[in-house]
Amino acid sequence: AQSVTQLDSQVPVFEEAPVELRCNYSSSVSVYLFWYVQYPNQGLQLLLKYLSGSTLVKSINGFEAEFNKSQTSFHLRKPSVHISDTAEYFCAVKSRVGGKLQFGAGTQVVVTP
Amino acid sequence: GAGVSQTPSNKVTEKGKYVELRCDPISGHTALYWYRQSLGQGPEFLIYFQGTGAADDSGLPNDRFFAVRPEGSVSTLKIQRTERGDSAVYLCASSLIGTSGQETQYFGPGTRLLVL
């Protein structure tokens, strides 16, 4: 069985400030890790994923996440946010042998000027 | 190319009625997934198809829920005797099939179901 915990339900942040969204998981098997983003009135989109190799993964729009196996974490960071980053962010894990994603409850990021 | 599409976008029904929700996956994607997202929660897995067969239906909450994918493309999620607690956004996703397990799931916009 797997579970995902997103420690913050909402994160208010000022434009151009840094943001960190925390994600911890538990699993008895090896997993792949994902961050999905849901912009207002849109569907879920993949932001970035960790499959293997370098533990630091980056997205095209400036987000990055680091896989920490010892702490079973996959925190998401961005050094400087834009108004357009306002969205809900979901951390998810997937067993390396199964098809389904297990999601956290989500973190709502609200960026204000 | 076209993404995953779901119809209807919204469905309002009365308690006890039967509903069908449709998902059209990305062309060429042989894996299809259904999830349910209740208010304030993350998506919750329901069922996963590889081709025409259900590879994992462990997330279906009870026998009122059923899903089919007869030709390995379009899928229909069927809910019998709907209850108010079934109100949620039902999400469909598709992916390429593979042996690595690394395939990205692409999500549709969802069907918002409201049971009165």
Image (cartoon, rainbow, N blue to C red):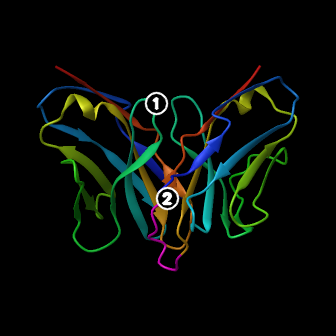
Is residue B103 on the magenta stretch? Answer: yes
B21 versus A34 height, above or below: above
Q: Which residue is mark 1?
A: A41
At label 1, which amino acid type do we have? Answer: Asn
* Quarter of the image where the C terminus of chain A is located: top left
Which percent across, then down, holds residue A63? 22, 48
Query: Residue at 34% across / 60% down in the picture?
Result: A49
Is residue A48 on the magenta stretch? Answer: no
Chain under disc 2: B
Q: Which residues are magenta?
A: B98-105
The local secondary structure at tag 2 comes to loop
Q: Give B79 or B85, whichever is nearer the viewer.
A: B79
Query: Residue at 30% across / 54% down in the picture?
Result: A74
Q: CA distance from mark 2 to mark 1?
A: 19 Å
> For residue B105, which numbered disc appears in the image?
2
The local secondary structure at tag 1 comes to loop
